[in-house]
Image (cartoon, helix red, strand yellow):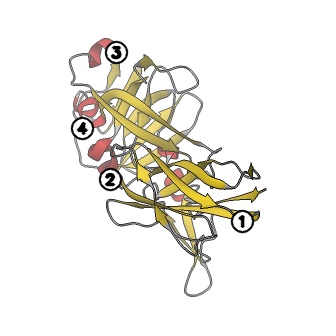
Amino acid sequence: MLQVEGEVEQPRRLAPADLAPLLERELGAVLECAGNGVGPRGLVSNGSWAGWPLPAVLSLARPTRATAHLHLCGGDGYARSVPMERALEGGLLVTRLNQRPLTRQHGAPWRALFPGWYGMDSVKWLQRIVVPEDPLPSLRGAYQELREGMTGGVSPQPLPRVQVKSVIVGPAEGAVLHPGLIPIRGLAWSGEGKISSVEVSADGGRSWRAARLDEGKDFGWTLWYAAVELSQPGAVEIVSRARDVKGFLQPAQRDPDRLDGYANNWYHRVHCVVA
């Protein structure tokens, strides 16, 4: 059962049958950990998620006041305060992944999902949704962007949407390549929407060529492909960068003013040898 409580007119204990009359939604979306590194073997996945919009779920309990946050409490003791605007914008109560019921590993029987945002708010094994008076302390603790302030202190800020990012899937780091036309393939995604372009460099970022993109979805990842001619033997650095529909471009390196370890999205570089 899912408890909806707090500043509501009618607290509810909801079973799947109570939600059946609501209109379901299905969408493809990347789910990325805020601390995911740069590279293809990381804390990120892509899937087709299905469930009920959080505004419709909340309406069953009839909230009595406008609040800035929503508390989400999981069965493992983990809880997050999520901005109410984010919940109303596109939050889902998910019960299926890739047309199948959620597994225990993925948060069964239901979990939250916020397309375009880092995964710390998409609470698994959801047990309680609370319409609160005040945010949980966790909103002011972990998962924040930290920068050195003007006076030398640390200036915390909420993390942004999932940052535009591309990764090279092949060739792999350390691969030995034969001279000739080398295929390069990878993935790209952004919390701002579709990927508009990916570029590839085979000389460490000095020159670039456009990659070919598969048709992507707003919050899902896009597959891309390119080919470069490598005729000279020796070490090669292959680099990728992506741009999204909002114009955000993957940066060459991490912002040196950042003191946290989140939202890592600088160029992915793969080092190979032509022999």
Mark 3 lies on a secondary structure that is helix
Q: Of circles 3 and 4, which is in front? A: 3
Q: Give the residue at mark 3.
A: 16
Q: Give the residue at mark 1.
A: 232
Q: Quadrant of residue 269?
A: bottom right
**Mark 1 residue type:** Gln
**Mark 4 residue type:** Pro
The answer to whether residue 65 is left or right of residue 252 is left
Residues at marks 2 and 3, CA–CA distance in whole angstroms:
27 Å
The disc label shown at residue 68, or none: 2
Q: Position of residue 18 (x, y in %)?
A: 28, 16
In this rendered view, identify the residue nearer to me: 114 or 61.
Answer: 114
**Mark 2 residue type:** Ala
Looking at marks 2 and 3 on the same chain, the residue that comes earlier in the sequence is marked by 3
Residues at marks 1 and 3, CA–CA distance in whole angstroms:
62 Å
Looking at marks 4 and 2 on the same chain, the residue that comes earlier in the sequence is marked by 4
Mark 2 lies on a secondary structure that is loop
Q: Give the residue at mark 4.
A: 63
Does residue 77 sit above or below 195 in this rendering? Answer: above
At x 76% / y 64%, what residue is drawn?
A: 235
Q: Position of residue 231 (x, y in %)?
A: 67, 62
